[in-house]
Each structure stands twice: as structure tokens, then as C-alpha cells.
Image: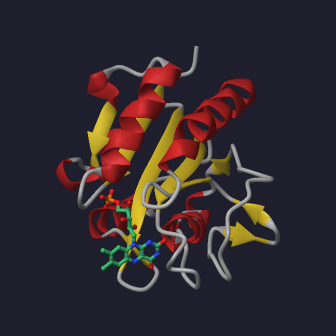
């Protein structure tokens, strides 16, 4: 059985809440849920599968704790590691919706991680998102501000996709 670690960067607690919802669905224990503000990047070495989540701030900026954490990950070879990305944003930021998810994706490329669990066919409404790479959303995007009623179903579907892929 592959070992899953969840790492999140969250400024006001929304992404943390989503991280805990994912953990519950995937059977991940509390000790394997990490706030990246208090975690060394080397901690990822304990896991076969990393679930990395962060919100978007400013105008399309990756949440600051995760931005620092990702810088630390760049020196680590993640060739044997599967990585799933998620993030929280606000569709009203229609030009930068969940850009942080796309930023994690692009910044992790040099680690050679294997990305899993893109999230397709979800009816988000935005003009632009860096999480949308060639028509494919590279991870789960959650909008707790405008569509909290859709979150449970999105988490259920995404966790099923992860279980199938790992
Ligand atoms: C000042 C500010 C800037 C934001 N900028 C963006 C943005 O560019 N894109 C986006 O999708 N969401 C944006 N958001 C929405 C946050 O990402 C959203 O509230 C998220 O749920 C916060 O998660 P956290 O509490 O885990 O940090 C912004 C929110 C604030 C208050």
C-alpha cells in the first residue's frame, strides 16, 4: 500500500479544511497532514504519494508558505513520487482563478515528479487560470466562496480518481 502525505499552505484556513476533508476520504492519518509553514521540504521523502494544496492570493500568486516550500522541493528528486495538486480560489478573480495550482505544477516540473489526478469536465467559470494547461485542469480547484455546495462531490470524485491511479 502506497503511503500518502498531504501538505498544505493556507492563510485563512480554507485549504487546511479541504486538506482534512481529503484525508478523511483517503484514510490519511493526522500525522501525515502537514502545514508547510511548519514543515521542512525533506519531509516529503517519507511518502510515495504527495498531495499538495494551496490557495491563490494577490493577483494570481501562490500562497506564500507553499511558494517557499516548493522552492525547497526543487532540490529533491521526486522521480519515484506521484504528486496530486489541489487549491482553493475564487471564481470572481476570473483572470487568475486558482493560478496557484498551475504555479505548483510548473514549478515542480524540474523535480521529475509524476503528476496524477487532473480534474476534468468541471464547470468552472473563469476567463483564465494557470491551472488550465492545454484544456486540462492539472489539479482539483475548489471555490468555497461561491460554490461550497459543490465541494463534497468534487472531493469525492477526486479522491476516487486518486485511489484508481495509485
Ligand atoms: C486579497 C485576496 C486576493 C485573492 N486573490 C485570488 C486570486 O488571484 N485567484 C483566486 O482564485 N483566488 C484569490 N483569492 C481567494 C482565496 O484564494 C480564497 O479565499 C481561498 O479560499 C483562501 O484559502 P486559504 O484560507 O487556505 O488561504 C484572493 C483572496 C483575497 C482575500
* Colour mode of the rendering: secondary structure
Q: Is residue 64 visible?
A: yes
Looking at the image, residue 43 lies above or below residue 131: above
Quadrant in which residue 97 is drawn: bottom right
Give percent across and percent down for residue 24.
Answer: 43, 22
The quarter of the picture where the N terminus appears is top right
Looking at the image, residue 151 lies above or below residue 134: above
Give percent across and percent down for residue 126.
Answer: 65, 76
Give percent across and percent down for residue 146.
Answer: 49, 61
Could you tell me which residue is drawn at 53 percent across and 68 percent down?
A: 98
Could you tell me which residue is drawn at 50 percent across and 58 percent down?
A: 143
Which of the pair 12/133 is nearer the observer?
12
Could you tell me which residue is drawn at 58 percent across and 66 percent down?
A: 110
Give percent across and percent down for residue 96.
Answer: 54, 80
Looking at the image, residue 69 lies above or below residue 51: below
Ligand 1's image quarter is bottom left
Q: Can residue 81 be seen in this view?
A: no
Quadrant in which residue 63 is drawn: bottom left
Which of the pair 78/53 is nearer the observer?
53
Residue extending farthest top: 1
Residue extending farthest left: 38
The quarter of the picture where the C terminus appears is top right
Q: How many marks?
A: 0
Could you tell me which residue is drawn at 68 percent across and 82 percent down?
A: 127
Looking at the image, residue 109 lies above or below residue 79: below
Amino acid at each position: 500500500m502506497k503511503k500518502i502525505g498531504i501538505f498544505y499552505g493556507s492563510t485563512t484556513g480554507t485549504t487546511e479544511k479541504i486538506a482534512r476533508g481529503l484525508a478523511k476520504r483517503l484514510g490519511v492519518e493526522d500525522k501525515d497532514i502537514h502545514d508547510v509553514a511548519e514543515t521542512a521540504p525533506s519531509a516529503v521523502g517519507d511518502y510515495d504519494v504527495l498531495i499538495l494544496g494551496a490557495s491563490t492570493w494577490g493577483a494570481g500568486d501562490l500562497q506564500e508558505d507553499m511558494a517557499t516550500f516548493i522552492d525547497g522541493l526543487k532540490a529533491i528528486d521526486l522521480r519515484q513520487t506521484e504528486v496530486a495538486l489541489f487549491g482553493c480560489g475564487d471564481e470572481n478573480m476570473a483572470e487568475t482563478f486558482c493560478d496557484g495550482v498551475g504555479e505548483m505544477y510548473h514549478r515542480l516540473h524540474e523535480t521529475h515528479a509524476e503528476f496524477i489526478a487532473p480534474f476534468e469536465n468541471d464547470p468552472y467559470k473563469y476567463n483564465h487560470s494557470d491551472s488550465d494547461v492545454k484544456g486540462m485542469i492539472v489539479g482539483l480547484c475548489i471555490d468555497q466562496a461561491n460554490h461550497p455546495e459543490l465541494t463534497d462531490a468534487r472531493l469525492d470524485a477526486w479522491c476516487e480518481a486518486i485511489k484508481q491511479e495509485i
